[in-house]
Image (cartoon, grey):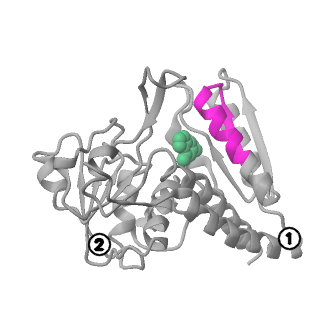
Amino acid sequence: MPPTADLIKGKDVSSEIYSELSERISCLKSKGVTPGLAVILVGDDPASQVYVRNKGLKCEELGMRSITVRMPETTTEEELLGKIYDLNRDPSVHGFIVQLPLPKHIDEDKVIDAIDPKKDVDGFHPVNVGNMLIGKPGFLPATPAGVQQMLVRSGIETSGKHVVVVGRSNIVGKPMAALMVQKAKGADATVTVVHSRTKDLPDLTRQADILIVAIGKPRFITADMVKEGVVVIDVGTNRVDDPSSPKGSRLVGDVDFQGVSGKASKITPVPGGVGPMTICMLMANTVAAAENSIR
Ligand code: GUN
């Protein structure tokens, strides 16, 4: 099918947000506050190294302070908790995150619980998760918040629309559904969550006006699973073999872009879709944390 869908590009949407953030950062600096983001990286997972470097570079580009705390794979849970308590107390660090996944001998929940919710710019602490669910202010998790910004800033009406979320992870699927069901701008949707155990999943995805896919399976959503005119947001990034590429592999989403873009009205590409929004929303949370610190 020839692609007929308009592309929603994370680079365009994030550029708009970055220029707004730059103004807020200048304003903070004029008051003697430089927003500071710390990232704790335990071990040397190669994908995490790349993410952490990109976060640091973006901070510097925006004129924010960036602190990377590298800890060895053999770090004990107590040592990591000790570092978190230090950052909780450090007034120059407005927000921080612990890059996941952590080595298996460290309890992720215990680590997240130790972060001061006022500095939890990942929005993973149960206090922030709870506030999001009941529609109170707090830090929103970056990827779902980024998807919502893409919809709002692309002029896509969500009120009264049927949003189908494919996937139920704590980082994307569940918070995405919680955001879209709120009585709020960029939300007010009727939300269905489908996942690996859902019966007749294609029957449900075909009812979506807006389909948000975060299931972690390459090209899982095919053209026969969507209705004509649907808006498709593809959160997936999967590396698949591709002998025709110089690297021997390439990135694809959870959506079969070629097929689905022939039926959708709007669609996010992979790469270049949701990806750039995640770091952008992390920066937005950090700027907000710095603003909150002088309120
Ligand atoms: N690992 C993959 N995505 C994320 C994220 O958004 N935050 C953290 N802390 N770790 C991650």
Identify the element where label 1 is drawn: helix
Residue at the image point whose x is 53% and y is 73% from the top? 137
Vertical relation: 57 (above or below) 32: above
Q: Quadrant of ligand 1?
A: top right
**Residue 45: percent from the left, percent from the top?**
60, 26
The total of numbered circles placed on residues is 2
* Residue 239 belongs to magenta span: no
**Is residue 176 visible to the viewer in this orientation of the structure?**
yes
Measure the alpha-carbon separation of dots 1 and 2: 38 Å
Q: Residues within 10 Å of mark 1 (few under 14, many from 20)?
A: some
Q: Position of residue 269 (x, y in %)?
A: 43, 50
Q: Is residue 245 above or below residue 143?
A: above
Q: What residue sits right under mark 1 in the picture? A: 29
Residue at the disc numbered 2: 189
Q: Position of residue 110 (x, y in %)?
A: 54, 41
Q: Residue at x 54, y 23 (%)?
A: 246
Q: Is residue 283 above or below residue 54?
A: below
Foreground residue among 179 and 3: 3
Three-letter amino acid code of the residue under disc 2: Ala
Task: Give the residue type at disc 1.
Answer: Lys
Q: The magenta stretch spans which residues?
A: 38-56
Please determine whether, in this image, residue 238 is positioned above or below residue 7. Answer: above
Residue 232 quadrant: bottom left
